[in-house]
Amino acid sequence: MTMTIQKEVANLEQMTVAELRRKYTEVYKEPTRSHNREHLVMRIAWRLQAEQEGGISERAKRRAAKIANEADLRTNAPQSTKKEIAGVTVKGTLPVKHDSRIPMPGTIITRKYKGRILHVHVRHEGFEFENKLYRSLTALATEITGSHWNGYNFFKLKKKEKK
């Protein structure tokens, strides 16, 4: 590996995930869906080295193609194991998974914090505060306080006792 490649790889370690994603697009000529920092560093470093030193040998490519040809590849989706019965209707209630600490959608959570009274509207999609939607109470509590907080603790929402 040449010194320029070593320097480029060392620079990758200092980049943010956003910068690595841009670098990936530059090097591979296509965007990535990955947000995993280590994965991006390894992939970009490999590509830089491969471009410099020639990549995978022809012998290795032939061997990989041979292995792929010999593999038992599935070409059709597996058959469904469910037996469908025409005209049968089942009545009943479906269990809804709901964290007992979170009030039902439509509820307004009120909390006094540093002399302010905070009103948070519980929605199906998340939590609305000052016309902004948050995915979690933790994200909202962190936004309000400026430091990481457990959302349930911040809003004093405790798990209900089972009877």
Image (cartoon, rainbow, N blue to C red):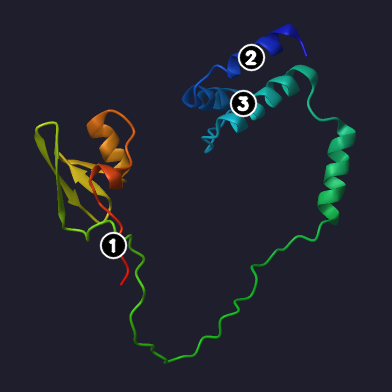
Where 16 falls versus 121 (above or below)? Answer: above
Q: CA distance from mark 3 to mark 2?
A: 10 Å
Where 110 falls versus 84 (above or below)? Answer: above
Where 103 falls versus 65 (above or below)? Answer: below
User: What element does badge 3 sit on?
Assistant: helix
For the residue pair 34 and 147, the one nearer the viewer reads as: 147
User: What element does badge 2 sit on?
Assistant: helix
For marks 2 and 1 on the same chain, the one whose residue lies earlier in the sequence: 2
Mark 3 sits on what residue? 41
For disc 1, the neighbor class at 10 Å (few under 14, some 14 to 19, many from 20) is few
Foreground mark, 2 or 1? 1
Quadrant of residue 119 within the rendered picture: top left
**Mark 2 belongs to which amino acid?**
Ala
Q: Residue at x 83, y 45 (%)?
A: 65
Mark 2 sits on what residue? 10
For marks 3 and 2 on the same chain, the one whose residue lies earlier in the sequence: 2
For the residue pair 35 and 33, the one nearer the viewer reads as: 35
Q: CA distance from mark 2 to mark 1?
A: 51 Å
Q: Tell me where residue 57 appears, x and y as whole percent.
A: 85, 30
